[in-house]
Image (tube, coloured by chain):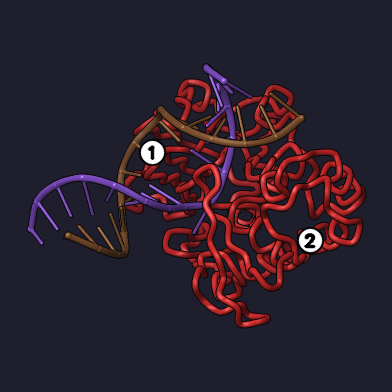
Chain colours: A red, B brown, C purple
Amino acid sequence: MPELPEVETIRRGLHRRLRGARAIAVEVREPRLRRAIDVERLRELVGRRVSAVERRAKYLLVRLEGGLVWLVHLGMSGRLLVLPAAAPRGDHEHVRVTFDGGFAVAYRDPRRFGLMKLGREEDLVELSGLGPEPLDGGLAGEWLGRKLRATRREVKAVLLDQRVVAGIGNIYASEILFRAGVRPTRRSYRLTRVEVARIIDATREVLDLAIASRGTSFSDYFDVAGERGSFQTRLAVFDRAGQDCVRCRAAIKRRVHGGRSSFYCPRCQT
DNA sequence: ATATGCACCTGTGTGC
DNA sequence: TGCACACAGGTGCATA
């Protein structure tokens, strides 16, 4: 479900609510996510205070005093909600961490593709090898440009590769390529310099706009307060097969590749 | 290096 | 109403 804009929206909400709070209880009802939660390790949360909530790619990093990080990935269907401590357990609520101050963070994930662990940052193997953050400025654009020119893969697969650039998923890959005017099936190394520059610009622009809209909610993405995002009303191509292109009125096409759908305008994207 | 298939799970929508 | 099937925002591994 969640890509960079959704995870960033959740990060902001968690940061606001959790900073300075102390965990007082950890309850795991179902440890079997894609990899099982080490429950004993996770219980080391108890008694620790949150110093900040950060994001790396699609991972949330809840920093705790003492140098530990509570790492959460939401997979396809994961959600984090901030609730009153007395709120009833919801469906598929696998983990609940209660904080002083009378509230709790609930992790709900029907498909259980998420990840949750506690560890020192340098031991979190999930974070090593990730590409640069596309919104961090600096050299991320230059790096992405170099990577795009250096591979024969299809450009959409390159954008989805977290080692090349961190945080883009299936929705925003299609949206970025529409904005850049490039078909998802184009071979990356054959892109012109102008096209590469347009992809770099579009990456920033699309992600910034989506964050400003607090993410894309089809049916089941909500932020920590249970609020929907609004970027679904601004999608140009994703999930719009057969509908009119917002620019040229041609019919949007859908293509399936390796089990994943791509959407593009056959007229605007070359 | 690249491509493909599959596995991990549950829920939802569609067509019969 | 039931049933079969396709598909879903992600990742990781095994195999060619």
Q: Is residue A196 left or right of residue A175?
A: right
Label disc, if present, on residue A204 of the rendered structure: 2
- Depth order, front residue of A43/A144: A144
When the figure is inspected, residue C4 is found, relative to residue A64, above or below; the finding is below
- Depth order, front residue of A13/B12: B12
Quadrant assignment for the C terminus of chain A? bottom right
Q: Earlier in the sequence, mark 2 or mark 1?
A: 1
- Crowding around mark 2 (Cα neighbors within 10 Å: few <14, some 14 to 19, many 20+) is some
Q: Which residue appears at 42% of the width and 55% of the height? A: A84
Letter of the chain that mark 2 sits on in the rendering: A
- Depth order, front residue of A64/A72: A72
| Relative image position of residue A221 (x, y in whole percent) | 48, 59
The answer to whether residue A53 of the structure is visible from this angle is no
Label disc, if present, on residue A94 of the rendered structure: 1
Letter of the chain that mark 1 sits on in the rendering: A
Q: Which residue appears at 43% of the width and 41% of the height? A: A96
Task: Give the amino acid at mark 2.
Answer: Arg
Q: Secondary structure at mark 2?
A: helix
